[in-house]
Amino acid sequence: MEHFTIRIADDEPANEFCALCGQAQPPTRGPRLFRVESDDPVCRECGKRQAPELIALLDLAKSAQRLGRVCRHTLVPPMESLLALARAAEEYAHSSTKSLQRVA
C-alpha cells in the first residue's frame, strides 16, 4: 500500500515528473502531494486514484486560500467564492467518509 503526505513547496519549483505515472508536472508552489518513501511528487490524477481524501483536502486548502486573498479587503465575500469553498468542503467530507467506510 502506497503512503502519501502533503508538503508545502516553498523553494523555487522545478519541472518534475509524477512518481507513479511519470507524467511531467508544471512547477507549483504551495501544498502538494508526495510519496513518503521517495519524496517524489504525485500528479493530481494519480492522487485521485490512490489518495482521494488527500486531494480533497488539498482542494479545500486551495479554496480557503483563494477566499482569504479575495476577502482580505472586503466586508462580505463574493457568493461564488463561498460556494467554491462549500463545494470543496463537501468533497472532503464525502471522501473522508468513504475512506472510513473502507477501513471498517
Image (cartoon, grey):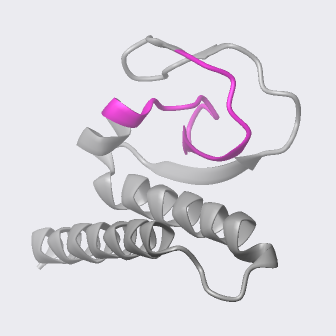
Residue 74: x and y in percent read 74, 80
In the rendered image, the residue lying farthest to the right is: 11
Residue placed at 81% from the left, 76% from the top? 73
Residue 94: x and y in percent read 21, 73
Residue placed at 60% from the left, 31% from the top? 38
Magenta segment boundaries in residue numbering: 25-45
Query: In the image shown, does 72 or 99 lie closer to the viewer?
Result: 72
79 above or below 27?
A: below
How many numbered discs? 0
Query: In the image shown, does 24 or 2 lie closer to the viewer?
Result: 24
Residue placed at 70% from the left, 75% from the top? 71
Quarter of the image with the N terminus is: top left
Query: In the image shown, does 25 or 7 lie closer to the viewer?
Result: 25
Can see residue 1?
A: no
1 above or below 52?
A: above
Dividing the picture into quarters, in which one does residue 22 lie?
Answer: top left
Residue 51: x and y in percent read 33, 50
Can see residue 39?
A: yes
From the viewer's perspective, tell me whether residue 103 is left or right of residue 1: left
Residue placed at 69% from the left, 66% from the top? 70
Residue 39: x and y in percent read 64, 35
Quarter of the image with the C terminus is: bottom left
Q: Is residue 46 magenta?
A: no
From the viewer's perspective, tell me whether residue 83 is left or right of residue 40: left
From the viewer's perspective, tell me whether residue 96 is left or right of residue 12: left
Dividing the picture into quarters, in which one does residue 56 lie?
Answer: bottom left
